[in-house]
Every structure is written in C-alpha cells, then in structure tokens.
Amino acid sequence: MSGRDLFCQPRRIRRGAALTLVFASVLVAGAATGSFPESGRKSAAGEARSAVPAGHHEDVARAAEEAMADGKSPMEAAERAVSRSGDRWGAVYSEGEYEEFEEALDGQYTGVGLWARRERDGRIEVTKVADGSPAAGAGIRAGDRLRSIDGETVDGKPVTEVVSLLRGDDKDASAGTAVRLGLGRGTHAWTKTLHRARLSTHSVSVRRLAGGITVIRIAAFTKGSGDVVRTAVRQAPVGAGIILDLRGNSGGLVTEAVTTASAFLDGGLVATYDVDGKQQALHADPGADTTRPLVALVDGGTMSAAELLTGALQDRGRAVVVGSRTFGKGSVQMPSRLPGGSVAELTVGHYRTPSGRSVDGHGITPDLDVAAPGEAAVERAETVLAGVGDAD
C-alpha cells in the first residue's frame, strides 16, 4: 500500500503513529516452519534502531496487569511500556483492531472502497473506486475531490488521518455503519452518506504488454496472492519475460512472499531470520522455470516481505532489480495477548537475504537506478527485459 493511498489498512491510526499506515508486513515464518506456538503469526516491521531487551513481552504484560488491578486502562499502560522500551515498531492494538488486522491479511477489509491521495495544494483527490463498493454505488469516481468526512474538513490533513476518519473508530468501524462524505467535482459540491461494507482486496493484478511480456503487480502479500502469481507465471507465453512490479508494496504475509519466490526459484534459500537469537530459514519450493527473463520493479515504498522477496531474487541472480532504493524494513515482531484482551506486537529479531545482507535500515539497492514514475518505469523495465532476453 502506498503511503499516499487509502487502501486496506490493518494497522490503524492510534494516537498519531505514522507507522500504522504501513500494511503491517506480517511474517508467518513460524507457520512455515512449525517453530512457533499458537497461530505462529509474526510481523516484519522494520528499521528498529536497537535490540529490544529480553523480557520485553513480560514487561508490557506486567504493566497492563498492574493497570487493570488499579482500575486503569491496561491498553494505555501497555502503550506507555512499549514507548519506554525504545521499540520503534512495537504497537498495541485493541482486540477489535487486531481482529481487523488479521482479516485484512486474509484479503478483506471494512470500508467504502476509496483510494485517494493528497495533492500538492493539500486537497484530497480520489484516485480509484473499487467495483461493487459503497463508493461505486454512490457514483463517486476517480478525480473527485474528498472535501470532508462526517463534517470534518480533510484539506491539508495527512493521508493517514484521512484513512482513520474513513475507517472509523472502535465504535463505528464495522460493516453497516454510516459515514458522511463531502465531495466535489469541478464546480459541483455535494454530500453523500455511505455505509461501510465488507470488501475484498485484489492485491495481485496481471496484464499483458506487446510482445507477450507479462506485468504482475503485487500491492501486498495477502492470503492466496502467491498462488495467483504462480498461476500468472504458468499462463504467461512460453519464453516471454515477466515484470514483477513491487512498487509501493509494504509487505504482508511472508509465507505468500515465499510462495511467490517459488514461482521463480527452483528451491533453495529465500531468507533467514532470527527470533530471540535463534536463526531460522525460509526456502522456496522446487520446480520453477528459472530461464524466463525477469525484472523486479521496486521503489522507496517497497518494504518488508517485498524486500525479502526482492533480496532473494537479486542475491540468487534470478532477476534484474530496477527502480530506486527500497525502504529498509526488516525486523521481526511477535504478537502476544495482554490482560484485558488487547494485543502487543513487539520486535524480537531481524531477517537477512540469502547472501546474509541485512535489509533493516539499509534497504536494497537496485541493479539499475530508475527514478521514472508510473508507466515510464514499466517502459524502462521492458527495455531491460529485452536486454536480459538477448543475453540469454
């Protein structure tokens, strides 16, 4: 999810934390290896500046428990404990927020179906409307101006705050709840009340360019996205190249990133990661076509699980990486249930590429630096792809 766009937002705005716009980049490394208890769900959140002290989970849980015993908010106490710990990417969620987070990773979210961005003059413009969504049913379309939400003017607000208003808070974020939007189109202004609905995210899109080149864009690694990519690769014209567009992909389920790697790598190492000092490894499945030309397109919005995939393809010489340096988000978080029902996600380790490179705080430098936006970058990737094919 691009930081400029309104999209599926598992991590909601809480007390102004900019982190929460990021797609959460959840590592399910434990589920992949069977090494973790319960759900095994982990999150790659990144760029932690220092190691989190041992017993971090226990300290946060103790703070919540003591607050609960004193009749205070256990969640607020846990948030203060996380803040004091220096865990930059640690976060605390209410029970409802965390359920929403997990649902989003399953490819669903509750909302009205708008994508938007803030223009240079501070106005919020709708960039896309999901088919079949409440916004589409209300006749809202790309290019419309979003002027207000429930009577609150959004001009000049960060997109993170606009997302928070659209999504609602704990009391009104469920399907069926109403949200009143002030809209504009040219000189016409109007107000429309929409009702939030359960919507599906389509995180993978596939299109064919002239000459048979297939462009596979992955917006986030939600449940099932890896299989969609593998199907797209199998259905691509024989011998034709592929552009894997990971721009703006801020992560998701790492098991899905590994499945995606399995579409291009014939087995072997995808990444290593450590949890509390114990190193684990993630491997691709064997059997992929490793001869098909491949270009991975990245930018500063490519994060976490998307960086893990990019690093594997680059280190193993499978793809030419084109674009700009990636974000550098590669620490591992583990969730734990707190007294009162809230959930703390706290940093426990970091992952590395097959060659041992640390992504966290560094990012991945592309093989070819291309600063072109939008379709211009795709065109440059096409040119590179042609060269890769000629070299083969």
Image (spheres, rainbow, N blue to C red):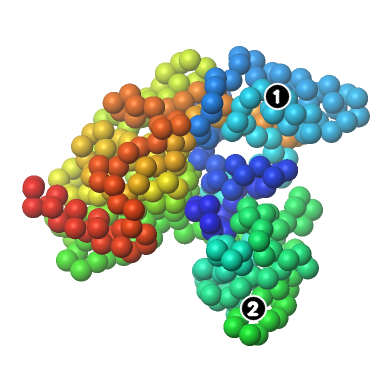
* Residue 55 appears left or right of 105: right
User: Residue placed at 19% from the left, 54% from the top?
Assistant: 385
Q: Position of residue 386 (x, y in %)?
A: 15, 56
- Residue 373: quarter of image: bottom left
Looking at marks 2 and 1 on the same chain, the residue that comes earlier in the sequence is marked by: 1
Which of the pair 328/37 is nearer the observer? 328
**Which residue is tagged 2?**
184
Residue 309 makes an appearance in the image: no
**Which residue is tagged 1?**
84
Q: Position of residue 339 (x, y in %)?
A: 77, 28
Which of the pair 196/316 is nearer the observer? 316
* Residue 391 appears left or right of 379: left
User: Residue placed at 41% from the left, 22% from the top?
Assistant: 280
Question: How many neighbours does mark 2 have within 10 angstroms: few (below 14), some (14-19), or many (20 or more)?
Answer: some
**Picture layout, residue 16 above or below residue 52:** below
Q: Position of residue 1 (x, y in %)?
A: 50, 52
Amino acid bearing label 1: Arg
Q: CA distance from mark 2 to mark 1?
A: 44 Å
Element type at mark 2: strand
Amino acid bearing label 2: Gly
